[in-house]
Image (spheres, rainbow, N blue to C red):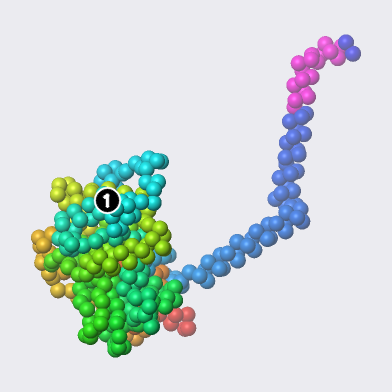
């Protein structure tokens, strides 16, 4: 034994022990790895099969949901045709670039103690209207010259949608024998029928196309100018007495159409969404001539939402300040309206070129007009493109959907499904993919036909 310890010291024994333990650990890991890769347990196999089936089912569902594309579409446009471009909504994200470049000029800080009361100005007709916001609305219209504000009451709403409902409520007598008819010339804004009838109100009812309206009795005619969806400047079309006009002027701004004169109507609706691009604020305003109509509109908003967010109004006031300042002291970007007008002009040129190259569609043609704000003459460049598929295509929305372009069918606007409305306000990347794909759709169809014929042979 003494001889053994002479040969192996305690240090040698410790090294030997460590080596044996490491060997044992490596063996265990090897056997575990072998089991995982080659001899997986039954439970693990079931789990794996379940996971695989789930993934395959999801993949099949996704494939069914996705519109079909020609297999060789990657040879037609840069993104391979796989990107789904959704231009159904008028989400004005093209304005992001302008506001990013203005930095923190439109940033506001609202302390936790501020704006806690329901009331903004208890002595005012519209008691929930922030005075600062009202002041900037008047300044903006005077700067642009697109609406008369003198002798008008301002009513603020959660977007122009709430104001539209408030107008219908204000113009419809509570003791009427039957609901008041609401009409608009087709193609009309697709949400008008839905909003009008969503509550099944006994006060008013959607009565369809103003051009074919011939019912006796009082009515409300909605005049959207420039019109959504086709972009044309509109006037009243119902030639009979007993009607009250409501002018939706959401797009009467110089980036979309020449400002010929200041609009001077009894009821005019505007929104931050399409003027500055801040759709998420959910802020709109009405300029109302009749005090009793304004009071009833305020009452509706009070009953509906007990006022309008003060935080949104304060932010909107700051944004309008920046817009006005950009008009008075333009930078290298120009004013907001310079920026947006240039971008819309560029986009419409690209779209018209794409439509010509495709040969499958048509677009409205507009006559140039003189703009008092931009001091130049130009043709309208609407926020939406009113595209028509040429015959024999009858379902334009379905045809474009098959090419991964999501639009809104003309049937929602009271006209033929040969038409679709396409938003021109998306981000640059999506818009450029859209026009590139639209310009090559005729090539896609040719490729698809050739592949089909080849498969038959």
Question: For residue 375, which quarter of the picture?
Answer: bottom left
- What residue does disc 1 label? 131
Residue 440, how many percent across, how many down? Answer: 32, 71
Residue drawn at x 33%, y 70% as measured from the top left: 170
The reply to whether the magenta stretch includes residue 18 is yes
Q: Is 135 on the left-hand or right-hand side of 452?
A: left
Tell which of 37 and 41 is nearer to you.
41
Residue drawn at x 74%, y 48% as measured from the top left: 35
Q: Which residues are magenta?
A: 3-19
Residue drawn at x 78%, y 29% as measured from the top left: 20
Question: For residue 286, which quarter of the picture?
Answer: bottom left
Residue 269, how many percent across, how many down? Answer: 27, 66
Residue drawn at x 40%, y 46% as measured from the top left: 116
- Decide: is 31 above or below 246: above
Tell which of 413 and 129 is nearer to you.
129
Q: Is residue 82 visible?
A: yes
Q: Is residue 412 visible?
A: no
Q: Is 16 on the left-hand or right-hand side of 73?
A: right
């Amino acid at each position: 034994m003494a001889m053994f310890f002479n040969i192996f010291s305690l240090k040698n024994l410790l090294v030997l022990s460590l080596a044996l333990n490491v060997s044992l650990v490596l063996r265990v890991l090897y056997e575990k790895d072998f089991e995982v890769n080659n001899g997986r347990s039954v439970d693990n196999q079931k789990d794996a099969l379940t996971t695989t089936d789930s993934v395959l089912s999801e993949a099949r569902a996704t494939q069914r949901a996705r519109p079909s594309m020609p297999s060789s579409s990657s040879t037609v446009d840069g993104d391979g045709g796989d990107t789904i471009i959704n231009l159904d909504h008028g989400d004005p994200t093209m304005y992001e670039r302008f506001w990013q470049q203005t930095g923190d000029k439109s940033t506001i800080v609202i302390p936790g103690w501020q704006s806690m009361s329901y009331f903004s100005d208890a002595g005012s007709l519209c008691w929930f209207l922030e005075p600062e916001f009202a002041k900037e609305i008047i300044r903006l219209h005077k700067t642009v010259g697109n609406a008369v504000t003198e002798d008008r009451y301002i009513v603020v709403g959660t977007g122009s949608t709430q104001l539209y409902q408030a107008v219908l409520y204000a113009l419809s007598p509570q003791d009427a024998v039957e609901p008041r008819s609401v009409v608009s010339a087709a193609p009309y804004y697709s949400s008008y029928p839905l909003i009008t009838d969503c509550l099944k109100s006994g006060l008013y009812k959607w009565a369809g196309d103003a051009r074919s309206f011939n019912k006796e009795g009082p009515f409300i005619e909605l005049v959207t100018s420039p019109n959504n969806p086709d972009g044309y400047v509109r006037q009243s079309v119902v030639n009979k007495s007993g009607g009250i006009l409501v002018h939706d002027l959401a797009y009467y701004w110089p980036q979309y159409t020449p400002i010929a004169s200041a609009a001077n109507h009894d009821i005019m609706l505007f929104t931050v969404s399409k003027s500055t691009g801040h759709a998420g604020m959910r802020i709109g305003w009405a300029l109302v001539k009749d005090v009793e109509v304004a009071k009833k509109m305020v009452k509706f908003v009070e009953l509906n939402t007990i006022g309008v967010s003060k935080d949104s109004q304060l932010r909107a006031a700051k944004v309008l300040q920046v817009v006005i300042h950009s008009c008075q002291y333009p930078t290298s970007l120009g004013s907001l309206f310079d920026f947006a007008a240039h971008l819309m002009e560029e986009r419409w040129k690209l779209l018209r070129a794409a439509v010509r190259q495709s040969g499958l569609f048509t677009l409205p043609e507009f006559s140039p007009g003189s703009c008092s704000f931009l001091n130049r003459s130009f043709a309208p460049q609407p926020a939406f493109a009113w595209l028509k598929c040429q015959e024999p295509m009858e379902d334009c929305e379905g045809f474009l959907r098959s090419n991964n372009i999501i639009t809104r069918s003309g049937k929602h606007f009271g006209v033929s499904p040969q038409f679709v409305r396409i938003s021109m306000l998306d981000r640059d990347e999506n818009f450029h993919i859209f026009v590139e794909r639209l310009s090559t759709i005729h090539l896609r169809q040719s490729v698809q036909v050739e592949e089909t014929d080849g498969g038959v042979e």
